[in-house]
Amino acid sequence: MQNRYVGDAGDYVKLALLRALSPGLKLGVAWYLYPDEGHNDDGKHIAYLKNASHWRHLDPTLFDHLGSIVESGRNVAAIERRCGLEAMYSSELLDHQKLHSRLRSDARADWFARVNQQMQNCELVFADPDNGLTDDQPARRSKPRFGKSLPITEALTLAAGRSALIYHHNSRFKGGHDLEVDHWLGKLGENSLAIRANAYSCRTFFLVNPTKLLVERARAFCATWRDHKVRLHKRAGSSASS
């Protein structure tokens, strides 16, 4: 997550999903907050806020709050204060770029230990890495931009003994996005499902260890948002409806 993304179309889907899944649960939000970058136009998909007739009915309260935040100042602190989520937030900046490469892995491990400690009493944890999931190759951990990714071991740790929702920005995976989603579902375990959201750009929310209630809420959310390119993913070889 970067502060410059707050309030864009992807943020609307993400926060609406959290608001749909979390009532009655102890929610934890690990922002995986990464310093704002300026090399591209990411975060500028806010035109939906000018098209209230098409978008606002999906979550009117959230829609109005995000519109106000975009006008007044885009940052995760504003979401924490104003978007109606009862949650424990972990907002520590994930920025190890200036460290020597040999120090980055240990710094990341220490950072994640603090995050996981903050989430210890939560029943549902949301992790919001900038780019999404990645593998656990040790060499990756020394890269300056590793903070934009979430290794699969961290995702599984956050989901241990509870439910977790993991953000993933679909990539140029060999074989396409369907195979990419199936790949990560395989890594996350049989008791997981994927919610695809393809408005503006392709992203996936992986729901790991969901309770029956969370599955029902996820299906209802997808039904509400189906005309806005949100759906449950159908695994290869599955007969389940998407």
Image: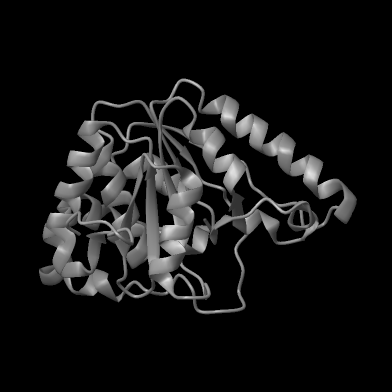
Regarding residue 73, the answer to whether it shows in the image is: no
Q: Position of residue 205 (x, y in %)?
A: 38, 53
Q: Residue at x 17, y 57 (%)?
A: 241
Regarding residue 9, the answer to whether it shows in the image is: yes
The furthest residue to the top? 121
Locate the C terminus by quadrant. Answer: bottom left
Q: Residue at x 50, y 79 (%)?
A: 41
Q: Residue at x 38, y 59 (%)?
A: 204
Q: Position of residue 143 (x, y in %)?
A: 77, 60
Location of residue 90 with respect to 121 vertically, above or below: below
Q: Give the camera-side residue of 171 and 12.
A: 171
The quadrant holding residue 148 is bottom right
Q: Give the camera-side residue of 178 and 203.
A: 178
Q: Give the camera-side residue of 42 and 218.
A: 218
Q: Is residue 96 left or right of residue 176?
A: right
Q: Is residue 138 left or right of residue 36?
A: right
Q: Position of residue 31 (x, y in %)?
A: 51, 46
